[in-house]
């Protein structure tokens, strides 16, 4: 620009400045729009009048004499999802019916888990379910934990943090597969072989619909280290 006159230089600089302002404005606008979308997603949805009436009817049916009606009511409340949580908690605080309390407590716990995104908490809960031999639930929790670990790994700026999170994700995914194998078949605890000189590896046989599957486990895993 040294060979240009003052007016030409000023004109070029003004055009560049306007371009920068436009780009910055777009970035700011995009950030605001993204923030608005995220805020909307983060805001818990609430039941409308029809939804509250439906939830109230389903809550009443939890105490019905007919077992099938009680089962259908629990399924209906589960389908309403997180918006039904306040009504569930309110009913839980008031009811003295033992079965109703157990059903609502189960619903509250399950719905709270749906909203949980902390992979460490999810993995800890999955381990608890696996140790209790509730393998289907453990499988679902480990699967969600693995997905959340990978999301965090993708967002991590530090390479070591990224690697650590990815490793945790791989571990959760492996445990998810193991829980799925246990959930899909019957553990045959009598058919266990100790392999290797140190006896630190076992082969546990799981009898499932697709046949018998051998799963290698360390002693720690065989003792329930999920």
Image: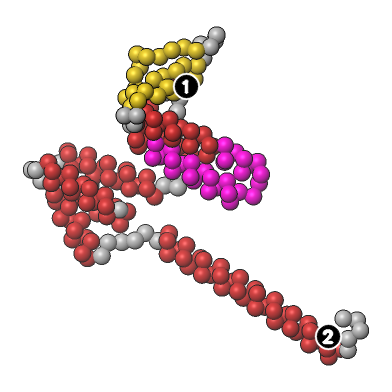
Q: Of marks 2 and 1, which one's residue comes earlier in the chain?
A: 2
Pinpoint residue 169: horizontal percent, then vertical percent: 52, 39
In reply to whether residue 45 is colored magenta, the answer given is no
Q: Which residue is mark 2?
A: 9
Span highlighted in magenta in the image: 139-167
Outermost top residue: 197
Q: Residue at x 24, y 54 (%)?
A: 87
Q: Which residue is mark 1?
A: 216
| Secondary structure found at label 1 | strand
In the figure, is residue 130 to the left or right of 6?
A: left
Task: Say which mark, if any, is on residue 13.
Answer: none
Q: What is the magenta segment's predominant secondary structure?
A: helix
Scheme of colours in the image: secondary structure
Classify 213 as above or below 69.
above
The part of the image, by quadrant, that contains residue 8 is bottom right
In reply to whether residue 156 is colored magenta, the answer given is yes
Classify 171 as above or below 88.
above
In the figure, is residue 176 to the left or right of 156?
A: left
Pinpoint residue 80: horizontal percent, then vertical percent: 27, 55
Q: Residue at x 47, y 21 (%)?
A: 216
Cβ atoms under marks 2 and 1 closer than 8 Å = no
């Amino acid at each position: 620009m040294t060979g240009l006159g003052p007016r030409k230089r000023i004109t070029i600089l003004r055009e560049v400045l306007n371009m920068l302002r436009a780009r910055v404005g777009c970035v700011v606008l995009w950030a605001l729009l993204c923030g608005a979308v995220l805020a909307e997603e983060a805001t818990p949805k609430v039941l409308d009048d029809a939804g509250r009436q439906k939830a109230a009817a389903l809550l009443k049916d939890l105490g019905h004499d007919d077992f099938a009606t009680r089962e259908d009511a629990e399924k209906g409340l589960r389908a309403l999802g997180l918006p039904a949580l306040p009504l569930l908690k309110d009913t839980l605080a008031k009811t003295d019916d033992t079965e109703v309390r157990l059903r609502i407590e189960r619903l509250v716990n399950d719905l709270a888990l749906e909203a949980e995104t902390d992979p460490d908490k999810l993995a800890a809960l999955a381990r608890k379910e696996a140790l209790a031999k509730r393998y289907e639930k453990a499988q679902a929790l480990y699967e969600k934990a693995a997905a959340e670990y990978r999301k965090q790994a993708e967002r991590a700026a530090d390479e070591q943090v990224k690697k650590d999170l990815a490793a945790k994700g791989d571990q959760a995914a492996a445990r998810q597969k193991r829980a799925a194998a246990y959930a899909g078949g019957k553990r045959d605890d009598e058919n266990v072989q100790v392999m290797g000189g140190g006896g630190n590896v076992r082969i546990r046989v799981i009898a499932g619909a697709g046949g018998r599957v051998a799963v290698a486990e360390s002693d720690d895993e065989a003792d329930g280290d999920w």
